[in-house]
Structures are given as C-alpha cells and as structure tokens.
Amino acid sequence: MPGKVAVIYASRRGGTRLFVERLQQELGAAQCELYDLKENPSPVIDSSAIRVVGGPVYAGNMLEEVKKYCESQQQALLQSRLALFMCGMNEPAFAEQLKNAFPEPLQQHAFCVKAVGGAFDFDKLNWFERFLVKRISGVRKSTAHYLEDNIGALVGAVKAEMTQP
C-alpha cells in the first residue's frame, strides 16, 4: 500500500491553496490529506505519513503560521519523511528566500526542497498590498507563475517516497 501524504500549509490570499490542491490531485486525493494551519495550527498527523510542509513568502519571509509550525514541530519533522516547498513571485530571489524560509536542520533533513512559484490575485489584495506589488514587482494585474519543472520534481520525489516502506 502506498504511503499517505500530509500536506501542511498556510495560504494568505489563495495562491498557495491552489498549489496544494493541485499537488493533492497529482499525488492522488485518496492518499493525500491537506492541513491548513490557519484553520488548525496544531494538526495531528500520523507519524508514518510523508509530510510536505510549505507556504508563501511575503517580503522575504515565510508566512508566520508555517514558521511557528516548523519551530514547534521541528523534532517530529526531523523524525519524518519530509519535503518542503515555498510559494512566491520574486523568482530572482528564490534561492535566498528558500534558504531563509525554513530552519536549516529541516532543509538538511528534507528529501526535497523546492520553490514552486505563485500568484498575485489583485481581487484578494488590499489597497496597500496592491500598491506594494505594483511598486516592487511592476505587476499591475492578477497573474500566476508556477514553476512547472520544480513542481514536477517535487511531485516525483514525493511519489518516489510513497513507494518506500
């Protein structure tokens, strides 16, 4: 029987939620359960589950719910099969942002760590967020840019782990 997958995430404006729903579909909905840290900051996860943890980066920082979860659950995460992902739209800064997104011990332990891209949904941003996005990125309308190669690598790595005992 293939391994179960727990995708533990937080989303601020919906772009990360779109990604994890796609991830769930590609991994097989019956084998993949989603845990939204905004709804439940301390989900109870089966210890044998493969854990895929991530969220969006805003202004260079991982969303607070994900940071807190990684800090409070670090020992459990270090004992599990773990993959990490980061959503974001500042592709030139992905390497640095990814390095700062998760504690180093988790990054060293994870079998896969990827930046997967993201989305700006102007309908869900407040006026100040729209101003910042326009000013910093130059983007003036809703857009999505997901990194298909990185998503494929993450899905492939998780599927490979699912076949392990």
Image: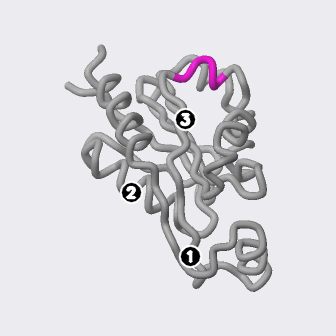
Q: Amino acid at mark 1?
A: Asp
User: Counting residues from the N terminus, which is met first, the one under dot 1 or under dot 3?
Assistant: 3
From what the image shows, is residue 58 above or below residue 97?
Answer: below
The answer to whether the residue labelled 2 contacts the one labelled 3, judged by CB atoms less than 8 Å apart, is: no
Q: Residue at x 77, y 74 (%)?
A: 135
Q: Disc 2 on helix, strand or loop?
A: helix
**Which residue is the site of mark 3?**
84
C-alpha gap between disc 2 and disc 3:
16 Å
Q: Residue at x 45, y 49 (%)?
A: 147
User: Counting residues from the N terminus, which is met first, the one under dot 2 or under dot 3?
Assistant: 2
Task: Say which of 19 and 34 sits in front.
Answer: 19
C-alpha gap between disc 1 and disc 2:
17 Å
Q: Amino acid at mark 2?
A: Glu
Q: Residue at x 53, y 59 (%)?
A: 118
Give the extent of the magenta segment: 106-110
Which secondary structure type mostly characterizes the magenta part of the structure?
A: helix
Please tell me whether residue 22 belongs to the stretch shown in magenta. no
Q: Amino acid at mark 3?
A: Leu
**Which residue is the site of mark 1?**
121
Q: Disc 3 on helix, strand or loop?
A: strand
Looking at the image, residue 34 sits to the left or right of residue 40; the answer is left
Q: Position of residue 164 (x, y in %)?
A: 30, 16
**Which residue is the site of mark 2?**
21
**Splitting the image into 4 quarters, where does residue 84 fall?**
top right
Mark 1 vs mark 3, foreground winner is 1
Q: Position of residue 126 (x, y in %)?
A: 72, 82
Q: Position of residue 10 (x, y in %)?
A: 60, 54
Q: Badge 2: few (under 14), some or many (20 or more) residues near its Cα, within 10 Å? A: some
C-alpha gap between disc 1 and disc 3:
24 Å
